[in-house]
Amino acid sequence: MSEVNYFLTEEQQMIVDLARQITRDKIIPVRAKLDETEEFPWEIMKDLAQADLFGLYIPEEYGGLGGGCFENCLAVEQLAYGCIAVTTTFAASALGGYPICLYGTDEQKSKYLPDVAAGKRLVAFGLTEASAGSDAAAIKTTAVQDGDYWVLNGTKQWITSGGEAEIYTIIAMTDKAKGARGASAFIVEKGDEGFSFGKKEKKMGLRASSTRELVFNDCRIPKDRLLGKRGQGFIIAMRTLDLARPGIGAIAVGLSQAALDESVVYARQRVQFGQPIISFQAIQHMLADMATYIEASRALVYAIARTIDAGAKNFSKLSAMAKLFPTDIAMKVTTDAVQILGGYGYMKDYPVEKMMRDAKILQIYEGTNQIQRNVIGQALNKEYARK
Amino acid sequence: MNIVVCIKQVPDAASVKWDHEKGTLLRDGVQSVINPFDYNAIEAALSLRDELGGKVTALTMGPPQAQEALREAMSMGVDDGVVVSDRAFAGADTLATTYTLAQAIKKMGQVDAVLCGKQAIDGDTAQVGPGLAVRLDIPCVTCVGDMEIIDGGKGLRLKRMCEQGYDVVEVGFPVLLTTLASLNTPRVPSLKGKMRAKKAEIPLWSAADIGAKEEKIGLKGSPTKVFSTHIPKFEARREMLQGTVEEQVDFLVQKLKEAGII
């Protein structure tokens, strides 16, 4: 854990302590089994609900705690120390819930948010499709108005908590000719007519999280399920991702910290050539780099999350930075952790091989790190054009 | 339903060290934690309240710092907490402790259920639960490993775990139960609970507040006198067995017989 004073409030420290306790008592003891069996972590979701953590970012009037991006980062960092598959399942509910929080009508918020805050219903966010990943504007799912209903057709791919969540925020094209301005956001519920799920994907890492296709086959939903205004779908999606990305950075920090801790403990007790391997500079320098990069990641995530909470207007660039750097570091740190543990690190008896498999997704989901660099680069270009 | 859960602060077993000369615990720098069995009592109390309504009050006897244990219980959902705290309570054995706790519970008025952990991991007597039931003159079921509400909330069906198996016991209210770890999985604290617990006022009740008689509390009320304590020494010795398998087995059997193990 960090020795740096990040000047947390008492309430923020409570969030850290509580999330750490759940990680220690509930996540770490079962993470290897969940990884092996790909079992959805319902028991842990119940614990997180009991702990009020699902309500962190939801306004108090809807049963939440009214926290911001920073509070969310503090919680997921601690949970990710135990298992990022579990944490992603938790965080995906916020990704699905943010659009309702940000753009929902009072009726939509009152209908959905109290249950989401109480952890009674998980939310999922559906943007990605088979041929629309980084190029999100290429989505093909359509929504056509039919009297008092919208009718959705198409297939979403790789949706976290697909099949397990009960509420889905879906981006679909309402005016194809308008391109990116022709997308709209909708709330779809599990059980809606014409809404079904594809097979559960088999993954390299993140195995306890459930990833499925969402299939819309003449799926009819009442017209009041439109979220925000017609044509606002991409703005909603981008705003949601901007808010969520520092959380992915925080997950990377938690995972990296866990990999470092495993590495130092091992390097202190593993004896080769008659001495603990931590006495070798080759190992020391790896550990030193890991520790330094992790603290830099943490400082970056915290500073940007706080900037967002302080009311920053356009924070796409900052948010991309808060995702990009810590996740690249997590890949490096977990890879080095396996290296330090050597053959043992490659075995499932130690947790670092899972950490390394899991880390890879952080560079891919919620916008690949190449896309993050595009966002940062394009923002720089715009900023300097104005100067 | 008025439910009381009795909890005890004990030294954290993971950080306990011994003074080998005096044969006592070194308490300096040792963190206090809630006795592990008491978490199961808290969970049982909360689940009874969740099902049947009412409130849960956590009770402990100890120094004012014991409020911290009650705040932890409150962060899990316990409604109120009371510490019975008085220098005159110091040195209490289980007889004096049960008297003191009973006086506090009587002050709370009508109580329908009292829950205690099976035993505390420091004293290990397992006497406070049953002793308290006698003081309160209510039925007692010890070592509860399973609990089910019956008769629409008028009673409980319990599994009382014994060495050879278990008894199934049905009991009405009021009742005192002592809980095992196998009874339930204690819930995690909640953020709202933690915030409420932090601000909660936890009263300290003195001997006078609970109308305790001086001769029945603390050292004066404790017939148990500890004359000496000793710390068992753990010595590991090693002897390698040599020869053929038959020779090794014969040698091992002989050694085990000499040691009185077989």
Image (cartoon, coloured by chain):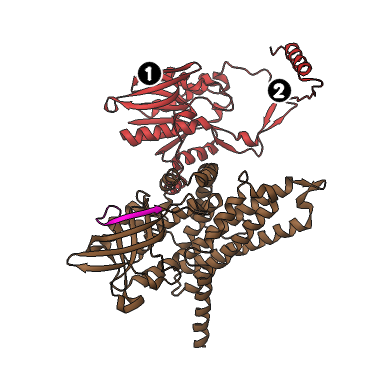
Chain colours: A brown, B red
User: Mark 1 sits on what residue?
Assistant: B169
User: Mark 2 sits on what residue?
Assistant: B232
For the point 65% across and 39% down, which residue is it?
B29
Q: Nearer the viewer, residue A295 or A276?
A: A276
Is the residue A115 above or below the residue A238 in the image?
above
Q: Residue A194 in magenta?
A: yes
Under circle 1, the secondary element is strand
- The nearer-to-camera label among 2 and 1 is 1
Q: Which of A311 and B10 is in front in this view?
A: A311
Q: Can residue A283 be seen in this view?
A: yes
Q: Nearer the viewer, residue B24 or A274?
A: A274
For the point 76% across and 20% down, which residue is it?
B245
Q: Can residue A223 be seen in this view?
A: no
| The quarter of the displayed image where residue A334 is located | bottom right
Residue B101, numbered circle: none
Q: Give the range drawn in magenta.
A: A189-199
Q: Residue A311 in magenta?
A: no
| The quarter of the displayed image where residue A112 is located | bottom left
Report crowding for label 1: few under 14, some 14 to 19, many 20 or more residues within 10 A (C-alpha).
few
| Amino acid at circle 2 | Pro
Location of residue A37 in the rendering, given as x and y in whole percent from the top left corner: 49, 44
Location of residue A368 in the rendering, given as x and y in whole percent from the top left corner: 50, 67
Is the residue A193 above or below the residue B100 in the image?
below
Q: Gap in Å between the C-alphas at discs 2 and 1?
A: 39 Å
| Amino acid at circle 1 | Val
Write down the chain letter for disc 1: B
Under circle 2, the secondary element is loop
Location of residue A132 in the rendering, given as x and y in whole percent from the top left corner: 41, 69
